[in-house]
Image: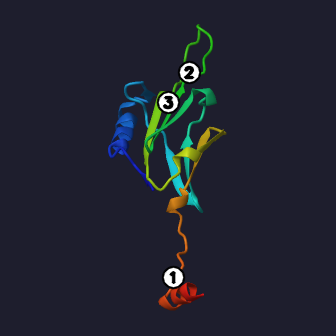
Amino acid sequence: MLMRTDPFRELDRLTQQVFGNNQGTWSRPTAMPMDAYRVGDEFVVAFDLPGVSPDAIELDVERNVLTVKAERRPATGTEHVEMQVSERPLGMFSRQLFLGDTLDTERISAHYDSGVLTLRIPVAPQAKPRKISITHAEEENKQINA
């Protein structure tokens, strides 16, 4: 149903930790952590985006590719700030997911609360399990003769 897209994501995350580069840029955004699971007839995807304003989050779906982009800016609002410690990652964050054809991309819902962006993606009606009735020859003959 959901397919991961970047096989090198863990390598990039390790490289960023080793070299201390926690700034995502437009050309090389940082991946955001996520959980994905199925509950009944929908998939739930939760992205960790603490400190990101809801206005700085973009969601796009194009042909079964879901793209989430967010930007976290420095919290300092004045010009004469002398930063003492800066460990929180800043900059651009991005994640793309390939959604299977069995998901209903027209009815995705998004909710942002306490730094967690939660998407709910319903399973398409044609992909849900359904019962198929079985007829046999005697029933068909009765219907024709009646």
Mark 1 Cα shell of 10 Å, populated few (<14), some (14-19), many (≥20): few
Secondary structure of the residue carrying tag 2 is loop
Picture coordinates of residue 31, whole percent (x, y): 44, 37
Residue 74: image tag: 2
Task: Give 58 or 84, whichever is nearer the viewer.
Answer: 58
Using residue 55 as the reference point, say whether residue 33 is left or right of it: left
Using residue 67 as the reference point, say whether residue 53 is left or right of it: right
Rendered view: 29 above or below 82: below
Q: Which amino acid lies under the numbered mark 1 shown in the image of this protein?
A: Ile
Residue 80: image tag: none
Q: Which callout, 1 or 2, points to the residue nearer the camera? A: 1
Rendered view: 122 above or below 115: below
Secondary structure of the residue carrying tag 1 is loop
Task: Give 107 or 120, whichever is nearer the viewer.
Answer: 107
Mark 2 Cα shell of 10 Å, populated few (<14), some (14-19), many (≥20): few
Q: How many marks?
A: 3
Q: Earlier in the sequence, mark 3 or mark 2?
A: 2
Picture coordinates of residue 40, whole percent (x, y): 60, 63
Q: Which residue is mark 3?
A: 89
Q: CA distance from mark 1 to mark 2?
A: 64 Å
Q: CA distance from mark 3 to mark 2?
A: 9 Å
Q: Which amino acid lies under the numbered mark 2 shown in the image of this protein?
A: Pro
Q: Which residue is mark 1?
A: 134
The single residue placed furthest to the right in the displayed view is 113
Picture coordinates of residue 46, whole percent (x, y): 56, 46
Residue at horizontal 54 percent and vertical 85 percent from the top: 144
The single residue placed furthest to the top in the displayed view is 80
Q: CA distance from mark 3 to mark 1?
A: 59 Å
Image quadrant where residue 39 sits:
bottom right
Mark 3 Cα shell of 10 Å, populated few (<14), some (14-19), many (≥20): some
Residue at horizontal 47 percent and vertical 32 percent from the top: 93
